[in-house]
Amino acid sequence: MARFVIEARPERSAWAPVQVALLALILTCIGGSVLFIIYGVSPLKGLDAIFIDPLRSTYGIGEVLLKMAPLLLIAQGLAIGFRAQIWNIGAEGQLILGAIAASLLAIQFEGSTSPLLLPGMIVVGMVAGMAWAGIAAFLRAQFNANEILVTFMLSSVALQLLYFLVTGPLRDPSGFNFPQSIRFDQAAMFPILIPGTRVNASLFIGLFVTVVALVFVQRSLAGYKLSVGGIAPRAATYAGFSSKRTIWLALLISGGAAGLAGVGEVAGSLGMLQRNVSPGYGYAGIIVAVLGGLHPIGILFASALMALVYVGGDFALLSVGVPNAVTDIFQGMLLTFYLACSFLLTSRIRRITPEAIASEAPAE
Amino acid sequence: MDVLIFIVGGTLAAATALIFAAMGELVAEKSGVLNLGIEGMMATGAAMAFVVLSLSGSYTLGFVAGAALGMVLSLVHAALTIIFRANQVASGLAVGILGLGLSSAIGKRYEGRTVAGLPENGIPFLSDIPVIGPMFFQQDIMVYLSILLIPATWYVLNRTKLGLTIRAIGESPEAAHALGLKVRLIRTGCVAFGGAMAGIGGAYMSTAYTPLWAEGMIAGRGWIVVALTVFGTWMVGRVAFGAYLFGSISLLELSIQAFGLNIPSQLMSALPYLVTIVMLAIISRNPTFIKLNSPASLGATLKLS
């Protein structure tokens, strides 16, 4: 009887990660079709609503680019940590802290027309995100506390802090008790990048960070040390690369990037601090980072795809009437199938026929 | 006395979901598989059990359906990590996200609805004992089962051949494989058990503890469960103790609201997470101690030839 064996691939094609991502996308479409059939919707109509419909109008494309900005920023930061096996899964909380800090500045200087206000918000937002992630870095470096759990718990704390602020101290007094702050002045808002859409400078920051990440990962010594720490921790130690430095660097970079994404939300599409400052960008950013193969360019495409799924989910809700949960399920499937298919990057399945076994087996 | 009865009885009920999920996660981790998707499995279990209970009126069917769906999700995690050699952290997150999405899809039409909670069954004679009776023996059946699950898990892990096999695989899957132990099968079984228990824990939340379905009702309990295995340094008794400790903290949240103390409710909601962070730092501060107690292969990608 023929047997199947798993063996390591001798060589890897540079395009293999792209093929794996595309395969995952195809499998997700198949899984999604099943989901649509359960909801009594034609799979073709459903997939069209999610993946094609948003790209038919300037409005749709604008919304995709708008949602791409936070995902891109968060994922570029997270990927740097993931390469070093530092799993920051609390980007959601770091985003919230960035949004809160930037909002505090915008609300404090209400009525200001200073051109320094917006840069100030960007800086405090980034620092706040770094500080929130820094708590996890400190606890991991000094007390060995698992950063996965700590960053998640800190996200939950950040969410409660946000709820406290928007229902209490920062609530707009003339806002009919809605859990949101006052509306920001023009000086505290990102300029619109593409006229006629809501796409703002946050996307520009995301693209800039992508270039920085590309240089950092491929050209800098610090980026190299981080990767070595992830692939071969012992080799990194022998080479004198400090693991504590790695922890700090990975968490501060990813926290800062997530904080920037938070600034981009309040100073961009929202124009205020509100309870729903993020529809889970922090968690979706994890998917984007992995789906992009932890590579800055891959992440660029993955963030566009995930943003498309976000917008497409809203489109599908309106056009074919499937609930929003479809967005989460699609995102979860993308990551699940990507992980399953990644196996094909490093291994292959070979069929061994009885004749081959007979001819290869050493004589006993 | 009434206060004491309230505290002990309330803690037992509040910790029940945590006990089920934590015992399941402990068994999976003992075999070397970290499952970060517990939150999603509890959520799907909760949604599924609520829907099945609402449709059929049967608690048994509800719990079975919740456990089954939790197990199905955990089998995806098992397949990814055991067959497809995926990173355990990434896989757990993927399955967790998938589970949260599924839970909201399953429970969509039932959002905000309530059901009659699982009835409490006083144990005859024992429940008539003053003080102790109402404290311990006036609970629903799942509370009793969760208490029984603790010694049962301890017994299987520490006193049976199966438990020895699980622990051996968790320490060194390569050595266990070389000895001819069925590493993949046992690990898959342990992960499936963990998923089923998470499903039951979630089902308890939606059909007994707060009998209602609301998206996000698991509220980080799945993550606290993962943290509990670290607190308990992978020992059954300590993990259970941690679960009861967290049960009492969530009770504190309720009682402070009841007494009308002027503490922001958000601070109380954040308390379990803050306590988790502090406890993690205290317990983990000695890396050698953690290393000695954690299953050696926990989190490592399985690579058997």
Image: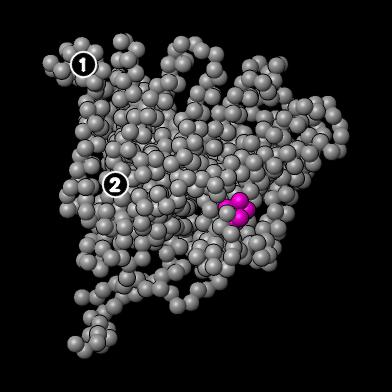
**The N terminus of chain B sits in image quarter:** top left
Q: Secondary structure at mark 1?
A: helix
Give the side of residue B27 with respect to residue A275, left or right. Answer: left
Which is in the foreground here, disc 2 or disc 1?
A: 1
Give the residue at x 36% y 65%. B303
Q: Is residue B205 visible?
A: no
Instruction: Kindly identify the amino acid type of the residue bearing the numbered disc 1.
Output: Gly
Image x and y of residue B18, in percent: 34, 34
Q: Chain of mark 1?
A: B
Q: Which residue is mark 1?
A: B133
Quarter occupied by the C terminus of chain B: bottom left
Magenta stretch: helix, strand or loop mostly: helix
Q: Is residue A10 magenta?
A: no
SS state under label 2: helix
Q: Position of residue A93 (x, y in %)?
A: 58, 38
| Rendered image coloring scheme | one colour
Residue, disc 2: B27
Residue B68 lies left or right of residue B42; in this view the side is: left
Residue A182 locus on image (x, y percent): 72, 24
Instruction: Please state the extent of the stretch shown in magenta in the rendering.
Output: A245-249
Residue shown at 49%/28% (left/top)? B271
